[in-house]
Amino acid sequence: MTTSGSESLGRRCDDLIEHARFMTLATCGPDGPWASTVNYVPMREPLRLLWYSLRDARHSRNIEADPVVSGSVFRTGVPNPLGLDGAQFTGTARAVDAGELVELADFYYRRNFADEQTRRKWRLPLAEFRGDGPRRFYVVTVTAWWLFDLDGWLADMNDRRVAVDLAALSGRRQEIRA
């Protein structure tokens, strides 16, 4: 798979979005910039990435102070000449509000743990995400997306990115539009 053609770009992006599972999230707050690795699940139309974290984690506090974020996703073992692929993004993050909590928590656990028994083992009580609970679900709405320029790297070994129109990210798994 290469970067040529918007359909191929869209397929590569969809593969990353659906299968990377972890993103590095960059935030900035009163104590300066911070990067954290979080386990996400994707939502589409528009493209959003959903995860949960402790409320007192530095990146969570930073989101409360400044919702503008950037991040990256990365995969190895990809069937291309380098065996890897990656993308960067920018977006706006927020804590999931009480009215969305039940639906989005259920979506997160179903997407992250397909096996019901495993899901029950890992699912945390919703009380942990409400009121004074120690955790929150967060969602970043992606506003821009760049894909690793695989063709360029293979041609001249220069590390560049290709801007991808968010409309090209077709969302092959549109299980929720919340």
Image: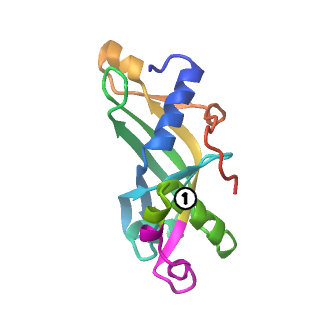
Residue 76 position (above or below residue 27): above
Residue 71 drawn at (x, y percent): 44, 49
Given residues 176 and 97, the one toward you in this image is 176
Residue 131 shows in this picture: yes
Given residues 33 and 60, the one toward you in this image is 60
Q: Residues within 10 Å of mark 1 (few under 14, many from 20)?
A: some
Given residues 129 and 153, the one toward you in this image is 129
Residue 152 drawn at (x, y percent): 39, 18
Quadrant housing the C terminus = bottom right
Range of residues picked out in magenta: 120-137
Does the magenta-highlighted stretch encompass residue 136? yes
Secondary structure at numbered mark 1: helix
Mark 1 = which residue?
110
Extreme residue toward the bottom, this view? 132
Identify residue type, mark 1.
Arg
Residue 175 position (above or below residue 120): above
Residue 139 drawn at (x, y percent): 56, 59
Residue 132 drawn at (x, y percent): 52, 86
Q: What residue appears at the point 49 percent right and 35 percent down from the top-left corner? A: 15
